[in-house]
Image (spheres, rainbow, N blue to C red):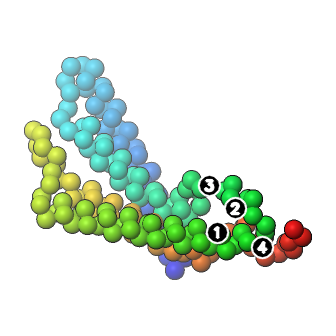
Amino acid sequence: MRVLVHRINQFLSGLAGWLMVVMMSLLVTDVVFRSFGRPLLLMAELSVFVMMIVIYLGFSRCEEQREHVRLEFVVNALPARHKPKVLFLANLLAVTVIALLFYAVTRSAWSTFQTGSAIAGAVDIPIWPTQFIMVIGMGVFLLQSIVNLFTPTAEQTEADRVPDFE
């Protein structure tokens, strides 16, 4: 399971990198054409959609590397023998929150699909394709957080090796 999720993370992070290039190109094109007094329609809106996709596709890789923001001062203050339990509980709480977010994003995507929600303008842009890509990103994020729940960190394995003299 860990290898499969790792490969999915590699693919999604590579895709997110290329989408960053697309987003940058959209924004640069928009700025250049605006400077000549000829703004192009939908460039800003499309770049926002691409940015949202990049963010959601990057969540799981960030979780795989354990690079999300964490408050470690409580864990660092604990004796070594208690750290693995606290880290497991923190990861369990993270899985629970991510599962709730996955549920919310999925419901939102389904709702926008059913209602046909779109950004109104000269051309209506449907929202649901972007939201379904966000669902994919959140799903892989949830899988990665479950994998991390059962994969010990260096802190957890170190606590097993070092005797606690406190």
At label 4, the amino acid type is: Arg
Q: Residue furthest bottom?
A: 1
Distance from the alpha carbon under mark 2 to that under mark 3: 8 Å
Secondary structure of residue under mark 3: loop
For marks 3 and 4, give the CA distance. 19 Å
- SS at mark 2 in the image: helix
In the image, is 41 to the left or to the right of 149? left
- When the figure is inspected, residue 143 is found, relative to residue 137, above or below; the finding is below
Q: Amino acid at mark 2?
A: Val
Work out whether mark 2 precedes mark 4 in sequence or the reverse, and give the earlier one: 2
**Residue to which mark 1 is pinned:** 87
Q: Residues within 10 Å of mark 4 (few under 14, many from 20)?
A: some
Q: CA–CA distance between discs 1 and 3? A: 11 Å
- Which residue bears the numbered disc 3? 71
Give me the disc on residue 75: 2
Q: Residue at x 27, y 37 (%)?
A: 44
Q: Residue 81: which disc? A: 4
Q: Which mark is residue 19?
A: none
